[in-house]
Amino acid sequence: MKVNRYALKRNMTGYLFIAPQLLFFLVFLVYPIFEGIRLSLFKISYQGTTFVGFDNYTALFSNPVFVKSVINTVVFVVAIVALTVLFAIFVSSAIFDKNAKYVSFIRGSYYIPVMVSMVVMSMIWGFLLNPANGLIPYVMRELELPAVNFLGNKDLVLPVIIFVTFATNVGQAIILYIASMIGVPKELFEAAEIDGANRKDVIFKILIPLVKPTTLYIIIINIIAVLKIFVVIQLLTGGGPNNASTTLMYFLYNNAFKYNQLGIASAVGVIMFVIALLLAIPQLRTMLRKE
Amino acid sequence: MFKRKNKRKLEKFDLVANALVIFFAVLSVFPLFWLITSSFKNSAAVVKMPPDWIPKTFNYVNYIDVFNNQPAFRWAMNSIIVSLVSTVALVIVSSLAAYAFSKLEFKGKNVIFIIFISSLMIPKEVMIVPLFRVVQDLGMVNSLNGMIWPNVATAFGVFLLKGFFDSIPDSLRESARMDGASELRTFVKIMLPIVKPGIGALFILFFVQVWNDYLWQLVIGQEENVKTLNVGIATLMQDLNPNFAYKMAGATVAAIPMLVIFVFFQRYFTSGITIGAEKG
Amino acid sequence: MLRKRLFVVLGFALILFILGACSDEGSSSEGTTDSSDSDSSKDKVELSLWLTPQWKGVLDSDEEGADYDSFFNHAAEKFAAQYEEYDVEIDVEVIAADQRDEMLNVNLNGGTPPDIFYESVFAMGDYAHRGALVPLNDIVDEEAKGDIASNYWDTVTFGDDVYFYPYSHMPGTLVYNADMFKAAGLEDYVGGEEEIKTWTLDEFDTVLNTLKEDVPTDKYSNAYPMGLYALNTQGDTWNLAYLRMFGNPFFDDNGNIVLNDENGAEAAAWMKDINDSGLTNPGAESVSSNDVNAMFQNQQLGISFTNSVLYNNTIADMESGNAPEFDARLANIPSESGDPLTFTYVTGAAVFDTGDETRIKVSKDFVKFFSSDPELVKSSKNGVPVRTSVAEEFKDENPFFAAYDENAQYMFSFTGNVPGYSELRQVLYPELQALYTGEKTPEQVVEDYQTKGNEVIESSRADSVIYSE
């Protein structure tokens, strides 16, 4: 009897501690997920809601703009994550063992765009790339390079968006790598040097393998960030030209808030949810194994 | 022996790499530099090609216009309120929960924790339609409340702080309990001070994250007075005003608060972000 | 130490939040509230009125502190002062035109639409089809019917009911930089200051080509003959007009798109051609009409688009020093037949079905009040007044009223009054982008637009409350 009461009290204490967090979690995350799945099976209009089964999903997969959104989103995730990891390793491995002031200067320079945020950076790039007034098209003209419209060319628009997103966000990865590399014991490098290894060997054989956990973390946070890429699309291209730069999040937003297709938008949300979950599973496994 | 020499001098590879690193670093700050200088020009000078790299005029009228024509100050306050309240609320609820998951024993703990952590990878934006309806039912559309509270649902805080609580020896808690301290008192008086670095890291990371939570704030804040700085300035870009420098002044206004925060708290940022990654 | 700082931060945050929460309350609690306020004799009714930017100031844009909401704030005050049944407060909110549909959708779905929306009728017709607006038949009296010509009533009538109270209209035309024309030696093509110049298509081509070759670059650096854009739906009516240049009627009698013929393709080819041969600003596919307008005001374009209100704002910007000063004059959109192409945006207020009888009634009373009060209707001169009486009164002050009147015979209905017009707009610009980037040929563009457009019209017709009645 006494034991039971003790267990009960113990349980209650635990529940009370997690209750506030759990409440927010249930109201703003768990419930919307189930509600989203439910809504995705309905056609929702101003007059009423009709059950349509999987019609929204079939409509989506026969919609070329949606298919384009899926492809673009995948391209963005792969390209931006790869670029970010490679460039961040390059920068951090070049500077991590230098003078502290220098390191902090470089780190700051790359981190400033992250702080200034994607919103402001997208506006700035919008000005810079404006085909009539922008600085970049002007420089291209001066150098007598062929006149191209970076935001209006369907082959260039993806690389441009990849570049802008990458250039804005790479600072975070650089900070993480630098910290992680500074944490590598100096003795390892000294030992390697005595063995006659040059800097390239040190970087590729010692440094990069040792910061693998950081790499994993960077990959994960960037995948999630790029999956919901929206601001840069809305402010730079509006999804154009001819939907060449549309993404899942942008497509979802338009359907939900512009075209008032809430059922379709919910279905896109469910699809994105599944993609995020699939991407998350490997990471979750490692994380839970650690527990 | 020459290896030692090598160590003193930079290897050629290293030299080239660092030259590139510096070049790109300058390039990465350039757009902001260009924005800020352009914002002080007048309309004609902005579109002039080749541009004046240093503005010939110091035309701060654009800034006056931004604050006169728009409730820009209100927007900035909104951003601060939303970020600060979200962050403080998350710190409170998630430190409680992280402590429970780490140190307390209760039925279903592991299952709840796994479900909880699984949600970490789900951006709230994918459920924006149902989430919006929830917020609508709570009467929080078009209010700062609607921008704030859904942020607190994230498992990010628990995820980050649990590692800190894990590294505290159980004996500390037990001895406090022996002395007759309640669970809450133990948590507040003994545990919280120890996880201070974790809370600092969470604070900084989450503050910036909420500040830049553009899409959600765009959807929730519709009237001029409840817009946040980023959203407000973004709508200003579509203004019919022909003066480009005015829009650039707007963009600069949106950039400044975070720049200031970064300059003053750079040290905390670096350590905060790193701690976040290590514990995660 | 930490605790102290933490408490300070927490305390600060809490205070801020309470402040925030308090001020939220003010904005979120619209609607009929109890009569607990100072004026206890009348019940209080709070209405929300939304508008997209129209004209600045009450009567003139050079008034002190003139802004887009000045007129409605003034009208609201005047209305409240004379209204006997309720103590009315009207909250006026200016909405960016490109956010209108987002905001309305969100608020309609949440059951919190604004009470009144003032906007161009073409952009709001869908809300009538969707059953979100209430008919205004009961506030339209014989006096109004007599003073406002029947073609305006046609524009605002959906099915059998009037859904918008016409207030003003804005004819769309072209605008050109007469100084730049003269600098390029195009004196002969410059029309009078109070004229809407009509060029033939050949003359128009000459103008564009001369501007390209002969505009002195020292005076106009980085300038282009004509503005062209296709980034989004903004200003798409001019694009719709260009597509009619070679005689395509656009809609058939059943309200279906018939752009896919020789004339339609020729028009598309013409647009593509001026874009390719450097007669327009570069990158039309990623440029918005706002960009183009700004370029014109910065003297980077010889010819651009405008409407009567936008034109007034352009002049006002010059006078206030917000933009460089130059001689901007109006011209018609040319066509192959020689007759100009003109259209107009009728603007007026609509009342949303909020489900609250009192608010609907007061909203209607307010709409009727500002749309018929002899003093307040004068502000419609900022566009072109729909009321003959007002147009007569101001015809000396604004010589364009006569010119617009002369144009009326060439007017085409750009919406064709089809259901789903807002969604139809979303179909056009991606096709134009495909045209300018060379992804599709002009023939493909008109064909694809026709197919997709008719699908939209088809499905919207099925959903329309007006058609189903």
Image: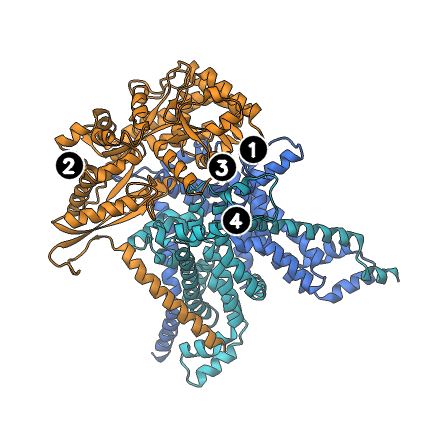
Chain colours: A blue, B cyan, C orange
Q: Which residue is mark 3?
A: C298
Q: Nearer the viewer, residue C5 or C27?
A: C27
Does dot 4 land on a helix, a strand or a loop?
helix
Q: Which residue is mark 2?
A: C139
Q: Which marked residue is nearer to the observer: mark 3 or mark 1?
A: 1
Going from N to C along the chain, the mark reached first, 3 or 1, is 1
Q: Position of residue A193 (x, y in %)?
A: 80, 61
Disc 3 and disc 4 on one polypeptide chain: no
Residue at the image point whose x is 68% and y is 59% from the top = A210
Amino acid at dot 3: Asn
Going from N to C along the chain, the mark reached first, 3 or 2, is 2
| Residue B2 versus residue A149 in the image, above or below | below
Q: Which residue is mark 1?
A: C219
Does dot 3 land on a helix, a strand or a loop?
loop
Name which quarter of the figure residue B239 lies in. top left
| Residue B55 versus residue A196 in the image, above or below | above
